[in-house]
Image (cartoon, coloured by chain):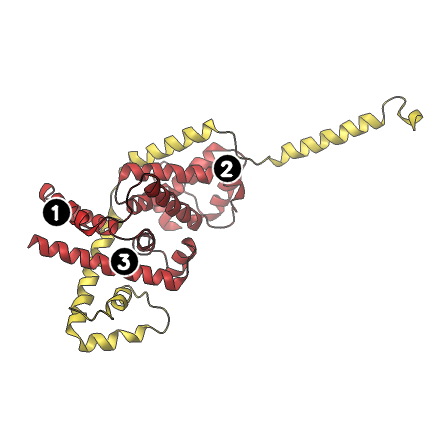
Chain colours: A red, B yellow
């Protein structure tokens, strides 16, 4: 909770748990300022998760975040103000991103050759090591299946426990562990191939 | 090359993601297998690289854009489908009042 508060922008309300319950109650009654405060509380997590699930495409991530918060607004009356809504929002974010990838007829799984070409081109253009690394990792994430990507983003980038990831993805812990393991091995092998290409 | 059977286990081992009881499977093997030790090191490297995305910087204006768009769309929509309690209470009171006025109107008892 403290981490969330720290992540929030300076112009956002510092919402702690009791404060959050109050905000949800007010938002349910139609208070737009309260809804804005809730939005502030979660916007960073929702947008960054969407960015990672959508292979680093910021415009798509913005669209996804908007859709997630519109769904939140539509579902306010169902929201239990005494329960933490983070997991619910992660689930909606994963679903919205999956739908976006499908609707736009983008292939969620990029072929290895395509992803490798993408990073090779990137290296020539961008000299910054950090950016290169991020591009490489986004390219690696793009080679994963939707489920693997969702599992690895939630576990390794959002730092959520395996059991919680399983709840968010409505899956079993065994399945999620297997997806995480496969995803890590695939990423490692992708990085290996890229490093060999560079030599 | 590391042992293919151990790769998925090492992938979980590097982040302590084992299910209970699985922890003891990898360490004895790592102690005797050099190629798997190398894979373990490389796996840790790629995990570190993956986690660089955690530090990705996104301009504050991006969040502001999202917030503005959402609030604009929300303001165009009707308010959430929940009736504040006082509106419901006022409705009930109005119905009761109408009933009382109806029952006490002149001539109401005569009809009975």
In the rendered image, the quadrant that contains the C terminus of chain B is top right
CA distance for labels 1 and 2: 48 Å
Chain-order first, disc 2 or disc 3: 2
User: Which numbered disc, 2 or 3, marks the residue closer to the eye?
Assistant: 3
Q: Tell me, yes or no, whether the two marked residues, 1 and 2, touch with CB atoms within 8 Å.
A: no
Quadrant in which residue B37 is drawn:
bottom left
Residue A60 in the image, given as x and y percentages of width and height: 30, 38
The label shown at residue A183 is 3
What chain is tagged by disc 1?
Answer: A
| Residue hosting label 1 | A120
| Residue hosting label 2 | A27
State the SS at label 2: helix
Asked whether, in this view, residue B96 is left or right of residue A139, the answer is: right
Q: Tell me, yes or no, whether the two marked residues, 2 and 3, touch with CB atoms within 8 Å.
A: no
Asked whether, in this view, residue A146 is left or right of residue B98, the answer is: left
Quadrant in which residue B85 is drawn:
top right
Chain-order first, disc 1 or disc 2: 2
Asked whether, in this view, residue B102 is left or right of residue A143, the answer is: right
Residue B6 in the image, given as x and y percentages of width and height: 24, 70
Residue A194 in the image, given as x and y percentages of width and height: 13, 54
What chain is tagged by disc 2?
Answer: A
């Amino acid at each position: 909770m403290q981490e969330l508060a720290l992540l929030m922008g300076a112009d956002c309300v510092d919402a702690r748990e009791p404060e959050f319950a109050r905000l949800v109650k007010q938002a349910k009654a139609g208070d737009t300022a309260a809804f804005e405060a809730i939005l502030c509380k979660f916007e960073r997590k929702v947008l960054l998760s969407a960015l990672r699930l959508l292979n680093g495409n910021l415009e798509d991530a913005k669209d996804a975040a908007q859709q997630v918060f519109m769904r939140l607004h539509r579902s306010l009356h169902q929201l239990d103000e005494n329960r933490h809504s983070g997991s619910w929002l992660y689930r909606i974010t994963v679903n919205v991103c999956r739908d976006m990838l499908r609707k736009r007829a983008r292939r969620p799984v990029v072929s290895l050759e395509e992803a490798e070409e993408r990073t090779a081109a990137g290296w020539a253009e961008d000299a910054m090591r950090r950016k290169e690394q991020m591009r490489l990792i986004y390219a690696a994430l793009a080679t994963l299946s939707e489920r693997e990507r969702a599992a690895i983003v939630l576990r390794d980038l959002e730092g959520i426990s395996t059991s919680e990831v399983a709840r968010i993805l409505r899956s079993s812990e065994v399945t999620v562990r297997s997806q995480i393991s496969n995803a890590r091995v695939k990423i490692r092998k992708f990085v290996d191939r890229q490093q060999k290409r560079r030599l | 090359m590391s042992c293919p059977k151990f790769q998925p286990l090492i992938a979980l081992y590097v982040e302590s993601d084992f299910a209970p009881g699985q922890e003891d499977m990898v360490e004895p093997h790592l102690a005797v297998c050099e190629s798997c030790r190398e894979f373990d090191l490389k796996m840790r490297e790629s995990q570190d690289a993956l986690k660089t995305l955690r530090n990705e910087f996104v301009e504050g204006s991006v969040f502001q854009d999202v917030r503005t768009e959402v609030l604009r769309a929300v303001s165009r929509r009707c308010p959430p489908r929940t009736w504040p309690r006082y509106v419901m209470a006022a409705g009930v009171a109005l119905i009761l009042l109408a009933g009382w006025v109806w029952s006490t109107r002149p001539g109401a008892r005569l009809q009975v």
